[in-house]
């Protein structure tokens, strides 16, 4: 099936399947079922079977899914069977946490560069990185061919940083600033804003 | 309309509408339209009108939405017309960043307590808080009547922390550990895992 015809909402569930399968593999498990995945994920077994069937035949009725095979397939579909470099712009608390974050390993990503515009931060070491001057952002990103950026600057600067990243060739942005970015249609943006998640839950609280 | 009959996916979009409207209010704007909201959010105008219509009549054909009125309505629907206390468990990089995060203000939340089990961290100051001993977590949360918890401990400890939070009366959990939690049906969980967002974008990269 051509990639363009799979709904984005299905693509959004694949990383969750992958994370759960990788956890099962860590537990030395070999085989799983759509029912077990459903229980762990809170998504119906029918939905999981339907999603996976869009990409081929991964399991047989009654025998379940081979965990390692399905992991390899999902890694290939999501293109995380390689390692993507990430540029992080903004070395505040969140940017620093990301620079030291261990959770990227074996999941397809590594932080490659850190930028900030604050002269006090430029040249200092954070995690394994020397903070670079934001004035060199466009050129450095372009030269390194980096396609993924994380924005961890204040909201007031996020749009301008996004534009520089895109100018440097970035095509996927993970934005931690609580503001919607205007980007061309060939650029993907995802948002991390804890308040959005919290507000989705308070609706259900008494 | 009864809260139980609104699909959760609609509830999930309301905080995005609220954030965008609050930004417009910050820009001293008075009136907006579903078309303008659609452009800013990347959600169709028809979807926005349909979502909002589930909660009443907020705009008239041709005159648009009163931004402040709609903000107040959404704050009331999402129950963020009050301030919810949050307990944060795990004072690593991410927990510390959350303790100092300015983005909760005026959005319905404040961090109220920080816990860690590490004797080196207990008693130290992070942001405006003294880190408390995790052994006192259940009792302290219960006494304070806190309903919302954030988990920023390593994956291996996340399930156990979740169980303590729930024992203390927490009913909504924002989990930063890259692991799915098993919780009773009366507890809501949302996840923040940057890799899930990144993997959703690499699918589209060349």
Image (cartoon, coloured by chain):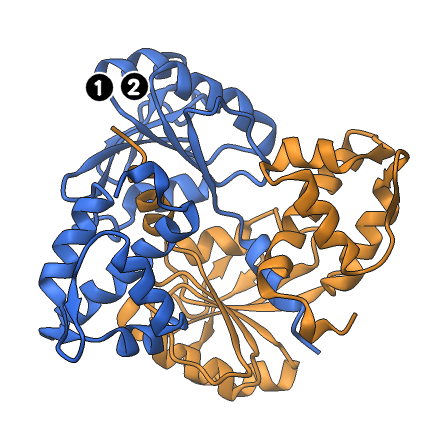
Chain colours: A orange, B blue
Q: Residue at x 38, y 47 (%)?
A: A197
Q: Residue at x 57, y 81 (%)?
A: A141
> Is residue A127 among what the camera can see?
no
Along the line of sight, which residue is nearer the eye, A99 or B142?
Answer: B142
Q: Position of residue A164 (x, y in %)?
A: 44, 84
Horizontal side of A130 relative to B69 (left or right) equals right
Horizontal side of B44 relative to B73 (left or right) equals right
Write down the residue under mark 2. Answer: B141
* Crowding near the residue tagged with mark 1, few <14, some 14–19, many ≥20 C-alpha atoms within 10 Å: some
Look at the image and tell me in which quarter the N terminus of chain A lies: bottom right
Q: At numbered mark 1, what does the secondary structure look like: helix, strand or loop?
A: helix
Q: Could you say which quadrant of the image residue B20 lies in?
A: bottom left
Instruction: Have a look at marks 2 and 1 and say if they share a chain.
Output: yes
Q: Position of residue B86 (x, y in %)?
A: 28, 33
Q: Position of residue B11 (x, y in %)?
A: 35, 49
Q: CA distance from mark 2 to mark 1?
A: 5 Å
Q: Position of residue B15 (x, y in %)?
A: 30, 54
Q: Residue at x 22, y 19 (%)?
A: B144
Q: Is residue B196 above or below residue B154?
A: below
Q: Residue at x 24, y 28 (%)?
A: A206
* Crowding near the residue tagged with mark 2, few <14, some 14–19, many ≥20 C-alpha atoms within 10 Å: many
Label 2: chain letter: B
Tags 2 and 1 touching, CB below 8 Å: yes
Q: Is residue A21 above or below residue A196?
A: above
Q: At numbered mark 2, what does the secondary structure look like: helix, strand or loop?
A: helix
> Is residue B81 among what the camera can see?
yes
Label 1: chain letter: B
Write down the residue under mark 1. Answer: B144
Count of marks overlaid on the render: 2
């Amino acid at each position: 099936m051509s990639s363009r015809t799979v709904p984005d909402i299905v693509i959004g569930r694949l990383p969750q399947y992958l994370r759960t399968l990788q956890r099962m593999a860590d537990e030395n498990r070999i085989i799983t079922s759509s029912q077990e995945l459903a229980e762990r994920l809170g998504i119906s077994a029918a939905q999981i079977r339907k999603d996976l069937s869009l990409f081929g035949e991964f399991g047989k009725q009654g025998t379940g899914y081979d965990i390692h095979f399905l992991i390899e397939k999902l890694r290939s579909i999501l293109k995380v069977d390689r390692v993507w470099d990430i540029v992080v712009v903004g070395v505040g608390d969140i940017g620093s946490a990301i620079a030291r974050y261990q959770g990227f390993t074996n999941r397809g990503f590594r932080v490659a560069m850190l930028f900030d515009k604050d002269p006090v931060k430029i040249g200092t070491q954070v995690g394994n990185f020397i903070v670079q001057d934001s004035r060199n952002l466009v050129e450095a990103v372009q030269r390194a061919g980096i396609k993924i950026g994380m924005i961890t600057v204040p909201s007031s600067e996020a749009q301008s940083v996004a534009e520089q990243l895109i100018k440097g060739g970035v095509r996927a942005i993970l934005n931690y600033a609580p503001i919607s970015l205007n980007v061309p249609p060939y650029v993907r943006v995802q948002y991390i804003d804890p308040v959005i998640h919290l507000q989705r839950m308070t609706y259900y609280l008494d």
